[in-house]
Image: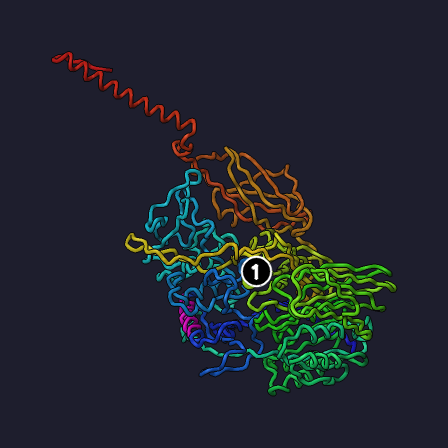
Amino acid sequence: MRFQKAFVLVLSYLLCSSILKCTGIKLENNGYRDIVIAINPNIQHNEQLIQNIQEIVTAASSYLHRATKERVYFADVKILLPITWPAGSHTVRRRTTESYEKADVIIAEPYHKYGDEPYTLQYGGCGEKGRYIHFTPNFILDSSLVSFYGPKDRVFVHEWAHLQWGVFDEYNELVPFYLFNGTSEVTRCSKEIRGRSAEHKNSSFSACETDPKSGLPKGDCKFHPDINQIVSSSIMFIQALSSVTEFCDDKTHNPDAPNMQNKMCNFRSTWDVIRESEDFRNNPSPYSGSVIPTFTLLQAKHRVVCLVLDVSGSMDSENRINRLRQAAEIFLLQIIEAKSQVGIVTFNSAATIQSHLKVIDNEGVRNQLVQLLPTTANGGTNICAGVQAGFQVLGDDDGATNGDEVVLLTDGEDSGISSCFSEVEQSGAVIHTIALGPDAAAELEQMSILTGGRQFAATDKVDANGLTNVFSSMVSGNGDISQQSIQLENFGTKVEEDTWLNGTVFVDKTVGNDTFFVITWQKQTPNMFVYDPSGKMYNSNDFKIDSTTHTARLSIPGTAQTGHWNYGIRNSGIEQVITISVTSRAADEKTPLVTVHVHISEKDLKDHRTIYAQVSQGFSPVLFANVTVIIERPTGPPIEQQLCDNGLSADIVKNDGIYTKYFSKYSGYGRYNFKVRVQGKEGKTKTAIRTGGHSFYIPGYTENGIIQISPPKPSVNVDDLEADIGDFNRVKSGGSISVTEGTLNVDIPPCKITDLQATLAQNKVVLEWTAPGEDYDEGAASRYEMRMSDHLLQLRDNFTAAALVNLTNLNPRPFGSRETFTFVPENTELQNGTTLYFALCAYDKQEQSSEMSNVAKVYVFVPSPLVEHPKGSSVWKVIWIAIVVAILVCLIIGIVNYLVQKKCKGRTFAVV
């Protein structure tokens, strides 16, 4: 084995996580290139779909060019067709590193039929790129939907701004109106957009009623913009208006509107965020050439995979070679999809082809490949030799490696690894890397970065069961989720002599086919029992036991019963590590699986990363699950942290199915491996409607004062959308990151407060927020600094110049606690029309400050006394009595006057 220390350590920022795409979009000469639009394999062949996509993107390119002041356009677009589609009259190329799971735009049916609303999935905050844009095939094909959202090319640009530049919507369906200077305003940008607010009742429109307590419209009041406008912004509000051709900039931005753009981007305009993005910082000049994009049709194919496995001498230590065989067996027998092709290469100082490509079309082929897995280890390490032999194997089917995959596992250093980087990059193949142990080549991950592959690591802590977890995550990225194997359990621990390891695995209603229980041990075969939900017992005799690799495998025939599967493993011998993993496939291809997608963000300026776990069924988010991440670190034991979907700390949006946590618990330099566990509970965990950035649905237009109503949005069956999923388990690898010298920052400030609220109670202001931590969301902050102003942007632009709110006596509580503070503003009279804004920062013991919180607003609205008290109250009774008395007095005076005048004609009398 070669043990020459590499002079340059490569820091992997996890540019491509194990699940999240590493975008291939490039901006060259003002044109976006390598945009991938992928069609889901469940979509039926439709030539019109391809044509419409091209027409929409072509028109969108021109609109984008105009909207960005002639700075960018769409130059090169790839459309990835499903494997089942015929080429037809089109010229179709073989794909390379493009795949459905890494596509920028996906065309797919939603599981729940709640309309064709386009949206963009965004994980991060302001300025951070999104995950993907989702259009339904019906949105692409149905011309009538223009009346819902406007021209489709404009919708495409609206969603592109979410995806590429990380901006947010400038409308707010939950808060469509707000008060400004005593007047109700529509949440919009710019404020110059005109229209009519009205409520549609009984087939006619009526003026909106005003809530006497808030001063805002109530009921189902909606804003109907004038069809003809004189303003040109903004695309992130209503892109459908013909006059709208620009994003709101600093001149037209409406910082007072309570929308996501202001909340997420600290009241900055969308154009300001776009202009400061990497695209525009490096691309300042306008472009005046052709903006018509070129289109390339690519086609997916069945997987072609070569396992390239290290068998150098160091693989003989720490039981690595046997652990490799155990994990690779699971991949070959349970994970790799039918109709795929698989080959095997081993390498030490030289490479050996153990198997050329074999088509996975029966269990016999799977078992043949298992028999060719390595059992011994010796010699040095030549990674490039292994990769080059892997390319040779991948060429067996058609002479090319484009779109094929290499799974590369090594535990050793190799000073010559960079010698084949150029060949790797030009191969068109995707390389997934697995670093086993602490000494794997520092540059290893560069191979996956160059090819858009996944990055994994596994330590020698065998009770972590990391290698098995990695191989179980090597599923296809073609979008056909029903064919993927799902990991339900992955657990290992030391079990003492004559002790039981007991547990429960939940087989939910979305899985059940091809269900396997796999148990491994170190020394002596344990006694194994599995009980299905009806009580049927499987014992050791039902397992297929391999005493050489210390593996036992139980295959559940047919479709496994839904419910709780209990297992008991008795270690009758000396203390040893025992592991269990359970995998299954979809029970019904028409019912989407509950899936988990994991992403570890790039580090920020303070060296923290954010862990994201997206839990969903189809495209519907799964709420109220218990999500934890287990992190294997270079030194010390693994740590476990809870991920939350509560809208606090690192979590951007509450209840969107994206569970989040800051990570900063570094133990030193080296690789960090992430594994996410998800558990759902019956009666608690449920699906919901997808939220996030999406194009504004227009309820109608106003023309010459008359509202032309749009077709209603499709009705939503809430019972279907908020369905109880029941008990379920999922385990997913989150990939790995590498940390090298000079990248650790142990000085961590408190996290930003994102839920500051301000309300009025008589003449007092009540402020509430969730406490941050000492280090992001850990511990308790040292102190708070709160400021207030009657000018919104003063808090953002000159926080320390605003008036100080005295919080000296408020001692910060631990993260997650609710803080409340009530006070009477000094030198400020709370009278009708008064507006005050509040923000605060938290400090740690080192006087490091958090980012400024969100800005909370109080507006003093004093309703009319006649409106303030409801009919039937004591005040109303007094008013009505006074009115009646006044009428009676007037009548009496009138009668007296009449009588006096009648009796005394010719005389003059005055009644006082």
Q: Is residue 105 visible?
A: no
- Percent position of residue 408, x then y: 69, 76
Inspect the magenta stretch and tell me whether residue 610 lies in it: no
Read off the magenta span.
51-66
Residues packed near mark 1 inside 10 Å, few (<14), some (14 to 19) or many (20 plus): many
Q: Quadrant of residue 685?
A: bottom right
Q: Is residue 309 visible?
A: yes
Residue at the spot of label 1? 123
Q: Nearer the viewer, residue 910 or 134?
A: 134
Q: Residue at x 59, y 80 (%)?
A: 428
Q: Nearer the viewer, residue 484 or 572?
A: 572
- Percent position of residue 747, x then y: 68, 54
Amino acid type, callout 1: Tyr
Quadrant position of the N terminus in the picture? bottom right
- Side of 297 relative to 399 (left or right): left
Quadrant position of the C terminus in the picture? top left
